[in-house]
Image (cartoon, rainbow, N blue to C red):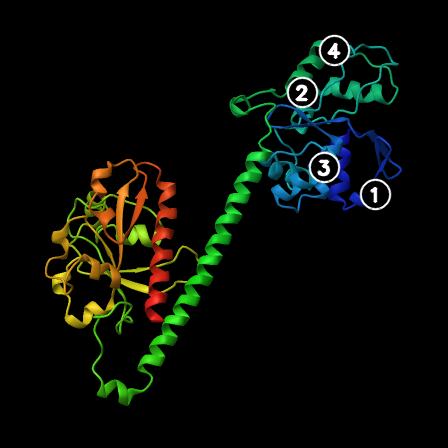
Amino acid sequence: MDPLSALRDYTIRGELDRIVRVNDEFRFGLEYSFPCSAETAYRSKQGSLYTLETLVFFVRNHQLKHIEYLQKARPQGIPAVTLPDRKPLLEYLQGKVSSSDAIEFLVPPNNVNTNSSAKFPDLPLSSSLVASDSLAPNLNAINDARAGKPQDVDLPSVMTMIRAMERPLKDRESLLECKQRDFYSVLVASTKREEERQRMDSQQRKDGLVAKSRLMGSEETRYGDESAYDATPKPKMHLKGTKIGEGVPIILVPSAFQTLLTIYNVKEFLEDGVFIPTDVRVKQMKGAKPDCVTVQKKFSRDRVVTAYEVRDKPSALKPEDWDRVVAVFVLGKEWQFKDWPFKDHVEIFNKIIGFFMRFEDDSVESAKNVKQWNVKIISISKNKRHQDRTAALEVWDRLEEFVRSRSHS
């Protein structure tokens, strides 16, 4: 019995607990014993044969996630089963499949002869070989020789049988595998990044829920007394820090195409953290330009936080609508604020938080006017779209902080 077949047999029978390590060998009950470092017949897709120690450790810990399995094997100095090999190897050891191209039962280098004392290894003889008329007599001869019965063996036919059992050491996939490379550190780093992202999402959810509860609490306090509300007209934003008007908060964006953020692409940027150029979104939308877009902060899958209306036509706002305007994305030109119900941009940015979006490698001249205003400059990359999420989060952080300050004023 070879080590791989013995391990498979004990795995199928559910007797892994009977495999005991004694010094440098594994004892399979009272039946077999093999060196821990013995190479098995299962070849990794990277080209090397797995040792018995590696397979015993794997089959006893296969229920662990791959990263946990690696972390457990590494301190013990046990080479690990690679991720691509896990599923097919486990299916073979558990008896779900009867064979695998990765298995190579090798023949010892001793020359085969007709001497009755010759010892033939316990090779697994496949049914397809046994069924062959040309090889069956020689297989019978080998079996008789194992039993101590002298037999003549046709050496060429035996060699044909051996070649039929051979498997290629390399294929297209294995040639593309990187040998002698340890990607464990890469896997750990990517796992940590994912955990950090989830932690940030969780924190953002908590902050958003706190902001929403505070905002709802302030509105209930303000409008809880209906008689007072009916008797007193709703105040308008004439003082710094005036509370938000009744209804969904409003974010204004420029209607000009020369700005990065417009009503066409604002939803993808603020909701999904991805910047898509306006001209691309216009082609994708295939419809009339929307008058209003609703956006929500939903960087996590679990909850959706406060909704906002995004508009690009300030002239269409009613006087009471201006009480709900909480943010504006500026174009960088004074004429953008023409006919706004404020005397100048100083008053505007005392009552409304301003943002200016630009590419990080744009010239300083593009933000010359903006730098004189109370506006937050948001820079994004022209090509590195994975960085858009950070920029979008910065917008949400500052917007929510501003909304909280207005709600408590």
The residue carrying pointer 2 sits among few (fewer than 14), some (14 to 19) or many (20 or more) residues within 10 Å by Cα, namely few
The type of residue carrying mark 4 is Asp
Q: What's the residue type where badge 3 is placed?
A: Pro
What residue would you read off at disc 3?
75
> At which x and y percent is residue 312?
17, 57
In the rendered image, which residue does mark 2 sit on? 133
C-alpha distance separating marks 3 and 2: 53 Å
Query: Looking at the image, is 52 positioned above or below residue 206?
Result: above
**Label 3: which secondary element:** helix
Q: Residue at x 82, y 10 (%)?
A: 114
**Element class at badge 2:** loop
Instruction: Determine the image quadrant of residue 402.
Output: bottom left
| Residue that numbered label 1 is attached to | 18
Question: In what quadrant of the picture does the C terminus appear?
Answer: bottom left
- As drawn, 308 above or below 264: below
C-alpha separation, residue under disc 4 versus residue under disc 2:
13 Å
Label at residue 154: 4
Alpha carbon separation for disc pair 3 and 1: 24 Å
